[in-house]
Amino acid sequence: MQLAQEQLEKHLSLGLQSLYVLVGDEPLTQRESLDAIRAAARAQGFDERNSLIVDRYFNWQQIQSYGQSISLFASRRLLEINIPTGKPGVDGGKALQALASKAIPDTSVVIILPKLEREAKSSAWFTALEKQAVTIVINEVNAAHLAKWVASRLAQQGQQASPQTLEFLAHQVEGNLLAANQEVQKLGLLYPQGALTDESVRDAVLNVSRYDAFQLGDAVLAGDTARTARILQGLQDEGENAVAVMSPLMWVLRPLVGIKQAEMRGENVLNAMTNARIYGDKQAVVKRALGRLSLRQLEAALQKLADIDKTAKGVMLGDAWLEISRLCFGLARIRGR
């Protein structure tokens, strides 16, 4: 993952390119990569940014129309195209191939994709993008290297911790970089620069809010409707922003799609869970969830999360919290056939 960020920074230092492709499921690195591109765009005089999220009703003619339009307010533009499912379809594939073959004038395009299956990687549209774009593969941090990642993040804010404490932090977040980053930032706010004691880190990490979005994801996977409803209400009562709940829910649900696909191909489910960095007691919870939820339901849930994200950011009308509640409660109450 660090290599991907260094690779991106190297390219950005040479000036913004016409086409970028970000491939991978890890939400923190994806967000930071996007932030880096946006910052470089602002520094280089890109005055307008537009974001498109591809859903089942997406009209790919928008891309062609965007290329033909002239902005009244900006001479250079940044266009982000997020494809949460990684499946653009026939029309989308043609549009992406066209985009790869001919750049949009005065525009830098960023295409955001999840981790792709082998079939998608060998598709004509992705092959065309790879040939022309700066492609950044966002790999997840291996569990064995997470403590080192935490140490590097602490160092960025002038703090250090013992190897035992770094392992403790890595174990607490169970491989989740979003949670790890939150804990590191919290330590930066609570304690001054310098060496952190084992006791102070443990106190800070274990002194958490009563409710968090990761607990919500666990309750949904467990099919515990009462706990799901209680955590949803608790998050709202604590003033949690709907947008802040989106990434943890995506992080919890997205690996299940790949594991379910592996299961349908007759592959070993335990190996698939390990490859998705799901370990220990979490494997039993995920296995029960896979018994309740179909591939179609999981893919529909990810698409719904993309729609809710638009609502939370004001792109679509609606109540984001209401839609999150409906989705989570709906998934929790599904029972296997």
Image (cartoon, rainbow, N blue to C red):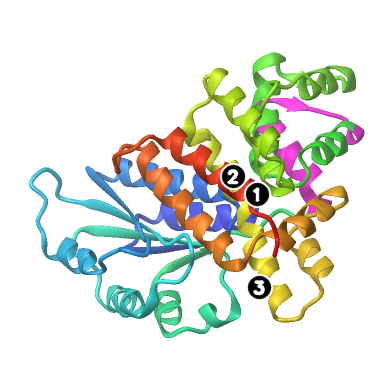
Q: Is there a contact, CB below 8 Å, between mark 2 and mark 1?
A: yes
Q: Which quarter of the rendered picture does the C terminus lie within?
A: bottom right
Q: Amino acid at mark 1?
A: Val
Which disc number belongs to residue 261? 3
Per the model, the C-alpha gap separating discs 1 and 3 is 16 Å
Per the model, the C-alpha gap separating discs 2 and 1 is 5 Å
Q: Amino acid at mark 3?
A: Gln
Question: Could you say where residue 169 lies in the image, as x and y percent from the top left?
Answer: 81, 34
Please name the residue shown 67% across and 23% down the image: 186
Please name the residue shown 62% across and 53% down the image: 253
For the magenta stretch, what is the residue range?
A: 143-164
User: Is 70 situated left or right of 130 in this image?
Assistant: left
* Residue placed under numbered mark 2 in the picture: 249
Disc 2, SS: helix
User: Is 54 situated left or right of 284 in this image?
Assistant: left
Q: Is 63 covered by the magenta stretch? A: no
Q: Nearer the viewer, residue 123 or 268?
A: 268
Disc 3, SS: helix
